[in-house]
Amino acid sequence: MKFIKIFYVVFVAVLAVATFVEGFVSKQTAVENIYSAWWFILLIALLVLPALYFVVKKLKKNIPALLVHLSFGLICFGALISFLTSEKGTLHLRQNEPENRFFLSDGRPAMLSQKLVLKDFSISTYPGTDTPMDFISTIETSYGETTVSMNKVLSVDGYRLYQSSFDYDKKGSIFMVNYDPYGIFITYSGYFLLFLSLILVLLNPNGRFRQLIKNLSVVVVMALLFSSCQKNNNVETKENVVSQEEAKEFSKVCVFYSGRIVPLNTYATDFCLKLTGKPKWKNLSSEQFLLSWLFYPEHWQNENVLRVKKSLPETAGVKVVDGYTSVRELYDENQKLKLAPFVTERPEKSVSEILDKLQLVISLTDGSALKIFPAKNGNNISWFSSSEDNIPNLTENEKRMTKEWVKISRLAIDSSDFQVLSLVPLQLARYQLKTVGQGIPSAQMRRLEIFYNRLRPTTWLYRLQLTFALLFLGFAIYYTVNGNGKIFSKVLFAFCVVFFVLQLVAFVLRGIISGTVPVSNGYETMLFLALAVLGVSFFIRKISDVLSAMCFLLSGFCLLVADISISNPNITPLMPVLHSPWLSLHVMSVMISYSLFTVVTLNAIVSQVVMKKHKQDVDRRFHDISLVLLYPAVVLLSVGIFIGAIWANESWGSYWSWDPKEVWALITLLVYAVPLHDKLVPGLKKTKNLNIYLFFAFLTVLMTYFGVNYLLGGMHSYA
């Protein structure tokens, strides 16, 4: 048994090292020297086979637990069969040219049993845009015509074809070919057995999970367990400033931004945020700020509106006042950029950030930023800015409008001719509607998005939530030590419900605006994590007020991280591969498991640091709480990983690619599975040892969610 433990630790360590080899050397090096090496396969065999023998011998009477371990063995066996017998290659089809030859990954040619003909290739786009939503190939086989697209596979006599790429002229399509007649069936059988057995583990009345819950319930009954100020600076003059009424007229206009057709307010909000760090500037709305810059750049380039987060090089001579500088200040008297000598291959972050803001201003004032003119481009619609001369199919009046709308608007503002000014956005909106039709968001959807942008729910939610959470945590600790906290428990629960509803409304609003379940990027997954953690508090509130308050606090911190833009907060269309029903199941399962791991970590910290006054009974109680939460956490992570594997097989023809995110998720699963086997690791039966282990185990969660994105990259870098 001892050597199984050694192989287990070595296997986890090898996986971790391999991800860094892939991240800092190359994927090929990691695959050839580790993942596909004979010694790595031998290591897995030496770990799995003795472990299965031991499991069968020891768990004969515990059928659900036995099936869980056997399912992992079946999955590993399926992977081995795939490794030994599968074939992978690439098939290139040109339109109307029959072809059945493809090339294997090692360069050898192979043949399909029938010739395939590419009849058509098309790119499905989001309505009113040229942003790809799906890649679709129409293929003629001996059985008739069919289509292959992202997440839609074509099976030809045991060979599975996956849409991979296409030729630049769109007359050809490239497919991945996968032949794995035995491994997929065995592996999927293992997945099915795993999902079934995990459910049985949680439902088994004689299992350890249910016994722990019963023990905690008895303890609860017998012991009554754990009975921003902003400056309101005003613009001193209204000269060179677009009024609120004038700016409101332009809310009718849409702009193509971040792959979506959005109201001008969305771009204006991001413009203001990126320049100033605030969603509005002084008493100006984001639209007023944007349009004032657009119509009066000669004035605004003298205003200190560029936020400087970190100190610029002193020798550059850029004057910074209260953390802000101006566009004019970035140039010397000869109109040369002061920061030019500091623009190297890898410039300082402060330099690159201020230059990004400068470029944003330049692109606005030269007309290239605002893509507000749609035009037919074949079957698709492309969007153009006023600086472009190649906008097709324009009438003379429309050509004049594209070039002079800024000038006309400024003249109307200067002469206080509101009638003329109101005609400009009206004509722009009519032109967009005529060209795009139903692709233009309705007036209700535009108002909803503008409302969401101005609401900025994460900003005020995290401030309120963190404020209340810190107070509640103090009271929870006090009442836990001194008792008599029944009323407090009800108040805490009420606040959790209220903030859960508020977060849920914000989450649903974002989903309505984007048209998808909003879990496609880091920003959105942090929003869902905040929601999930708060949801966990409902299930553990009878176990511990301290843990409920901790969940409330952690949820607030998740909102804080989202608000400071841990990743891009813009609502962007999903890339084609993410258009799958598997996305929501995969992400939600994993994120809920992460929230449970976080609560487990907090429980360990509270147990170790705060509750030393109640030594023996409290230690045991916290020990059991950790294990109770670990069971569903490990189950959900397992489900999330293997749902992702099924999805990957349907998208890329391989259910496991040794991507760094995949590997670190597996490492997290292996690390957190250890405390559930404390009979094999007697030291973890002691609460202190378990707490220390869980604290360090949480580092794998942090590495999986944050570290991989920032250090290692990979196919999951968008997540």
Image (tube, rainbow, N blue to C red):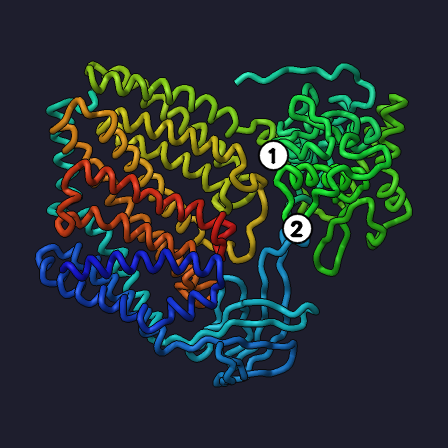
SS at circle 2: loop
Residue 653 is situated, as x and y percent measured from the top left of the image, at 45, 68
As rendered, which of 118 and 634 lies closer to the eye? 634
Q: Looking at the picture, which amino acid does disc 2 mark?
A: Glu
What x and y, as percent, mark residue 540?
26, 31
* Camera-nearest residue between 578 and 51: 51
Question: Closer to the observer: label 1 or label 2?
Answer: 2
On residue 612, the disc is none
Expressed as whole percent of the image width and height from the top left, the position of residue 533 reads: 36, 35
- Per the image, label 1 sits on a secondary structure element best described as helix
Tell me what residue is drawn at x 60 percent, y 27 percent.
Answer: 454
What residue is rendered at 17% in x and 43% in y? 684
As rendered, which of 100 and 702 lies closer to the eye? Answer: 702
Residue position marked by numbered label 2 in the rendering: 345
**Residue contact at pointers 1 and 2, CB within 8 angstroms:** no
Horizontal arrangement in the rendering, residue 249 relative to residue 538 (left or right): right
Vertical comparison of 633 with 483: above or below: below
Q: Residue at x 47, y 23 (%)?
A: 463
Task: Give the side of residue 585 with respect to residue 374, left or right.
Answer: left
Q: Where on the picture, by quarter, is residue 645?
A: bottom left
Q: Earlier in the sequence, mark 1 or mark 2?
A: 2
| Residue 265 showing in the rendered view | no
Q: Is residue 448 above or below residue 201?
A: above
- Closer to us: 697 or 286: 697
* Residue 459, image x, y percentages: 52, 27
Q: Residues within 10 Å of mark 2 (few under 14, many from 20)?
A: few
Circle 1 sits on which residue? 449
Q: CA distance from mark 1 to mark 2?
A: 39 Å
Quarter where residue 515 is shown:
top right
Write the residue at 65% across / 70% down.
167
> Taking 468 as reference, is 212 above or below it?
below
